[in-house]
Image (cartoon, coloured by chain):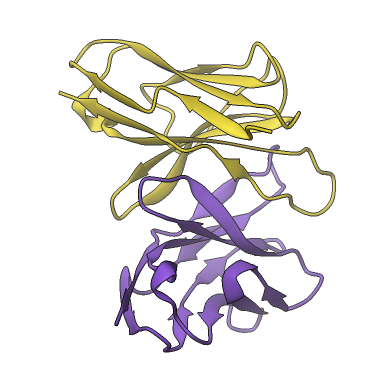
Chain colours: A purple, B yellow
Amino acid sequence: AQSVTQLGSHVSVSEGALVLLRCNYSSSVPPYLFWYVQYPNQGLQLLLKYTSAATLVKGINGFEAEFKKSETSFHLTKPSAHMSDAAEYFCAVSSLTGGGNKLTFGTGTQLKVEL
Amino acid sequence: NAGVTQTPKFRVLKTGQSMTLLCAQDMNHEYMYWYRQDPGMGLRLIHYSVGEGTTAKGEVPDGYNVSRLKKQNFLLGLESAAPSQTSVYFCASNRHTLAGAYEQFFGPGTRLTVL
């Protein structure tokens, strides 16, 4: 079985500060990992994904994440937060076993960006 | 391309009433999914489909039924709505893959309230 743990349901940063959102995964097979962002009253939008090609993955809007197998982590970072980054962020792990491409999501981290 | 669309956007039901949520995608995707999103619980998979005419249970299937009569449509039914089914429902789709993992594309969601 696979699972995802997101530490911190709410994170608050100042505009211009580093953003760090934590994600740890558990998977019995090599994982595919995703970060999605959800703006208020909208669906989920892909930020970036890890599919074993490179451990440092760059996504949209200046976000990146590093896959660390030894730590079973896939933390999301952005060097300088912008007000428009305020949203909810979800980490997800995928497995191709059992048919389909099912995603298991973490419980989400609400990011607040303050002036 | 419209991507993934969901109908309706909002709905209020009384306990015991039935309804059907419609998901449509115009990307010719083989796989489709229904999730529910509840505060603090992330997204949980209700049912999914790996192709026209096929459906399978996800993590929280009780109280829901689905059908995939056409490749582009995936219907979610509630036969007898209960207050515990008050949630935001998201549909998603992605391409079939034998290797690697393709991102899921999400619809805008349906906000359902059961009184």
Q: Is residue A18 left or right of residue B33?
A: left
Residue A63 can be seen, yes or no: no
Which residue is rendered at x = 65% and y = 69% of the image?
A59
Q: Which quadrant, please, contains the N terminus of chain A?
A: bottom right
**Extreme right residue here?**
B98
The percent position of residue A6, horizontal first and vertical second, equals: 42, 69
- State left or right for residue B64 relative to residue B92: left
Note whether A52 is above or below A15 in the view shown: above
The quarter of the rendered structure image containing the C terminus of chain A is: bottom left
Which corner quadrant of the image does residue B80 belong to? Answer: top left
Any part of residue B1 in sight? yes
- Viewer-closest of B31 and B28: B28
Residue A57: % across, % down: 70, 74
Residue for point 30% across, 28% down: B112
Q: Identify which residue is drawn at 54% across, 76% down.
A: A76
Q: Examine the rendered structure and indicate whether residue B22 appears above or below residue B44.
A: above
Q: Residue furthest left?
A: B115
Rendered location of residue B66, percent (x, y): 51, 18
At a point 67% along the width and 50% down the height, the residue shown is B103
